[in-house]
Image: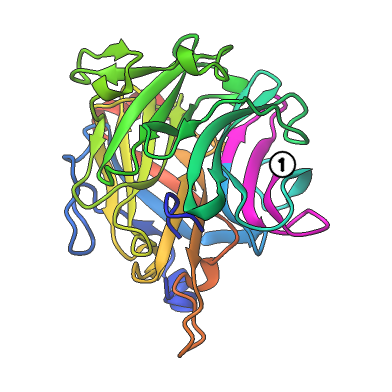
Amino acid sequence: MMSRLRRTVLVASMLLACGPLTAAPGAAAGPLAAPYPRSKVVTGITWEASTYRFGGVGGDLWATTSGADGKVYTTWGDGTVTCPARVSFGVASVAGGPGTTLVRAGCGTAGDKAVKLISLLAVNSALYAIAYLQLPRGASATAVWRSADRGATWRRPSWTFPQGELSPAAFANFGPGYAGARDTFVYAIAQRASEPTALYMARAPKDRLQVKEAYEYLTGPVASPGWSQIPAAATPVFVDPNGVDAPDLVYDAGIGRFLLTVAHGREGSDGGRVGVFDGPEPWGPWGTIDYRDGWLGIKPAGSSQLGQRFPSVWMADGGRTLWSVFSCWSRTKKTTGVEACGKYNDRYNLMKASLTLAPSRQGRHAG
């Protein structure tokens, strides 16, 4: 995988037999401390390990979005999965509720290490992707692609966000087909490769995502933000001294909060380092729901967390029940033959999670 996207021995059947894993919000389960105080709205998350299932063996990343047709669309990198030959990226859909039956939607560039679709967004009947372009001699760039046929083919603009520039890394997803969006803009987490501890916020009108000049960047404090077309004027919306990696952002309409997931650590050492945060806006301010090392028994050394996604179409029970699509990548250890990600390595992983709300919120979400 590329340096921008980070790639854990599982305490296998013993862990699953233990049942739900309940977070200790606001504090790490390992040596690293959470960067933000405990959430006052969502006081915890329980990971239902017994619900775990998988598909898509041989592919990683697994960005997701909820389509207007009720399906979840997802994309993988460097694998065959539903395609007849190995591709650098492919797109699949999942219908009928939380599941692992992947149906081919499109097959991209043949071979490995050419393009990775690191985030997906459905706007009405169109799909957009943040494409990470792996260029010759170790160079890279980021682009925003559009598909009018649900991932079968892509319209690629002539411009890119060059390597080193502040670039979109993850779209903020709302309801199916972008239903329930806060306004007419599409928001995206942005990152600089030179700043491994900070996340920024970018936005563009939803009908101008392929116009580079349309992008603006959040400036000033998150309590009263401004917007500038100058990337250098942007100010961070999330900072973690332990590192930030593989961010994802979705609006949970049932509880009226944005859920941000971010791995903490450095390349090749953040597998199982899970962070879940909530905020009233796409830029926060953030409260910690869960922050832990060794999630599911995954050991950070030698592994990378490649994303934790909560598809909005699968949210239930007033936004308290979620389904996580997550990805982990590691290299096989030559001496032991054990992969650091264990059974979760290089595949589409699915697990149920339940949020616990503060008492002041529980009444309005009962039933």
Depicted 28 relative to depicted 284: above or below = below
Residue lying farthest to the right in this orientation? 84
Give whichever of 292, 217 is nearer the camera.
217
Residue 104 is left or right of residue 140, and the answer is right
Residue 98 in sight in this render = no
Q: Is residue 232 magenta?
A: no
Q: Which structural element holds mark 1? A: strand
Give whichever of 303, 113 is nearer the camera.
113
Q: Quadrant of residue 79?
A: bottom right
Residue lying farthest to the front in this orientation? 137
> Residue 202, image x and y in percent?
39, 23
Q: Is residue 70 magenta?
A: yes
Residue 6 is left or right of residue 234, and the answer is right
> Residue 157, image x and y in percent?
62, 25
Residue occupying image coordinates x 66% and y 64%: 57
Give the residues in magenta.
64-93
Residue occupying image coordinates x 70% and y 27%: 155
Residue lying farthest to the top in this orientation? 184
Label 1 crowd bin: few (<14), some (14–19), many (20+), radius 10 Å? many
> Residue 70, image x and y in percent?
69, 30
Residue occupying image coordinates x 73% and y 45%: 108
Q: Which residue is mark 1?
A: 93
Q: Amino acid at mark 1?
A: Ser
Residue 280 in sight in this render = yes
Q: Quadrant of residue 294?
A: bottom left
Residue occupying image coordinates x 38% and y 70%: 297
